[in-house]
Amino acid sequence: QKEVEQNSGPLSVPEGAIASLNCTYSDRGSQSFFWYRQYSGKSPELIMSIYSNGDKEDGRFTAQLNKASQYVSLLIRDSQPSDSATYLCAVNTNAGKSTFGDGTTLTVKP
Amino acid sequence: ETGVTQTPRHLVMGMTNKKSLKCEQHLGHNAMYWYKQSAKKPLELMFVYNFKEQTENNSVPSRFSPECPNSSHLFLHLHTLQPEDSALYLCASSQEGGGRQPQHFGDGTRLSIL
């Protein structure tokens, strides 16, 4: 089992829809959770961080964390073609480890 | 100005050449990372340095040799590479290994092996 698992994708949604990206992790000592966006040929850029159970909203993005279920998700409302990218989930543990998932590729169709 | 700077941006080399990739961070971070990303593939963690000490070597072939002279600089020395080593090499830094702070990435070096 991978330490951080994401939907295999690719995920395709129409413009204006909600895109839902999911991530599960195996280490219960995980304390910090991040979502990165990576455009093709570019480096990953941080878009959201979350540390406590519940929802965290930033513009059109909402991160959701459920530590009991070891699950973190990213919702993108009113999806735009410019949101088309690969989204990476990253998890940091208390033991000083940082692990990335393989990513989910999102395509938003006009 | 980006917080993490990688040079060169592009590199073409033959299999018998020796070259080095450089990464410099201006964020005051203590942890630095090397990743390899082949075309349309996931990130592969190669090396982690925390306070200049190597804390992770992810079974990387010895033709890749990292060097971290201080917390702000990280090098990846390359020699006798193979065509399958052609990839985007990304450097990242964070305040500490793991913890509450995210990693910040440089723009990467795109490496092509002839």
Image (cartoon, coloured by chain):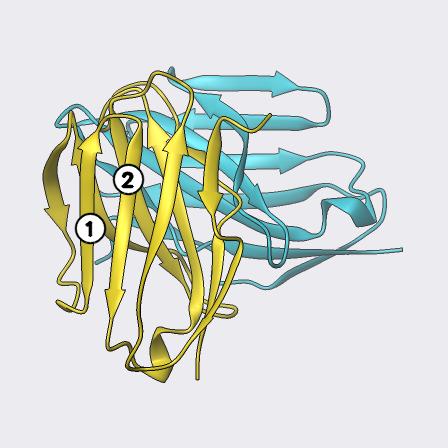
Chain colours: A cyan, B yellow
Vertical position of residue B92 compared to residue A110: above or below: above
Q: Quadrant of the C terminus of chain B?
A: bottom left
* Residue identified by numbered label 2: B74
Q: Chain of mark 1?
A: B
> How many numbered discs sit on the rendered protein?
2
Q: Chain of mark 2?
A: B
Residue A21 placement: quadrant: top right
* A19 left or right, relative to A34: right
Residue B66 is tagged as 1
Residue B96 placement: quadrant: top left
Whether residue A71 is visible here, answered yes or no, is no
* B82 left or right, relative to A34: left
Residue, x 18% and y 34% (percent of image)? B69
Q: CA distance from mark 2 to mark 1?
A: 7 Å
* B31 left or right, relative to A15: left
Q: How many residues crowd around disc 2 within 10 Å: few (fewer than 14), some, or many (20 or more)?
A: many
Q: Give the percent coordinates (x, y) of residue B30.
A: 24, 22
Vertical position of residue B88 compared to residue A78: above or below: below
Looking at the picture, which amino acid does disc 1 mark?
A: Pro
Label 2 in the same subunit as label 1 = yes
Q: Are marks 2 and 1 in contact (CB under 8 Å)?
A: yes
Residue, x 58% and y 42% (percent of image)? A37
> Which circle's residue, 2 or 1, is located before the other in the chain?
1
Whether residue A4 is visible here, answered yes or no, is yes
Residue B81 is tagged as none
Looking at the picture, which amino acid does disc 2 mark?
A: Leu
Query: Which element type, helix, strand or loop, lies under badge 1?
Result: strand
Query: Which element type, helix, strand or loop, lies under badge 2?
Result: strand
Residue, x 25% and y 57% (percent of image)? B77
Vertical position of residue A80 compared to residue B35: above or below: above
Q: How many residues crowd around disc 1 within 10 Å: few (fewer than 14), some, or many (20 or more)?
A: many
Residue A34 placement: quadrant: top left
